[in-house]
Image (cartoon, rainbow, N blue to C red):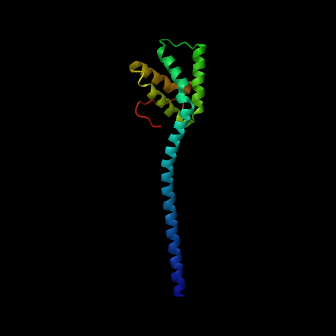
Amino acid sequence: MARLSTLAALLTALLVIGQVTAELSIVTTDVEDGTENRRQDDRDCRQQLQEQQYLNDCQRYLRQQSQQSERFDTSSEREQRQQCCRQLKQLSRNCRCDGLNEMLRQQRGQLQGQDLREMMQIAQNLPNECNIKPRSCEMEMRSSRI
């Protein structure tokens, strides 16, 4: 009888230890998956951006818009904006702002001062003009995230 109760107590202890270990493993896995998912998202964004030629149509559109002193919506501007919007729509929602920021970082060497600020302002509102989400993007000029 004593052996049976000792065996039962030992099995119960093993079950409790196994349960605690399983819960700890799940928490550890979740944390690791979060980091891995973020890295995978960054790789996916980089790949999407490459597939969309680093938003070259958006670069042309922004350059065209920033160089004009007055805003006329000509058919060529509408076409340029539509091409840009098509490229943006091809990026997943969570990559759009990062893509626009990366595109601006690539332009940084060619533009300065007011031209760059104007391009950033136009880029910030571009998702809204394209009727896609997010509606606006925060433009940053620090080092690349993707």
Residue positioned 52% across, 46% down in the render: 37
Foreground pick, 2 / 92: 92
Question: Whole-percent x and y of residue 76?
Answer: 59, 15
Please say if 5 is above or below 141: below
- Let me know if residue 130 appears in the view: no
Question: In the image shown, does 69 or 106 lie closer to the viewer?
Answer: 106
The one nearer the camera, 48 or 129, is: 48
Q: Is residue 83 above or below residue 67?
A: below
Disc tally is 0
Q: Looking at the image, is 1 positioned above or below residue 40?
A: below
Residue 30 appears anywhere in the view: yes
Estimate the x, y position of residue 11 in percent, counting from the top left: 53, 76
Instruction: Please name the residue shown 51% across and 23% down the image.
Output: 59
Assign the N terminus to one quadrant of the image: bottom right
Quadrant housing residue 4: bottom right
Q: Is residue 78 above or below residue 5?
A: above
From the viewer's side, name the closer residue of 56 and 115. 56
Specify the farthest residue to the bottom: 1
Q: Residue at x 43, y 19 (%)?
A: 115
Residue 70: x and y in percent read 50, 11
Image coords of residue 69 (percent x, y): 47, 12
Q: Residue furthest left?
A: 113
What residue appears at the point 53 percent right and 74 percent down from the top-left corner?
A: 12
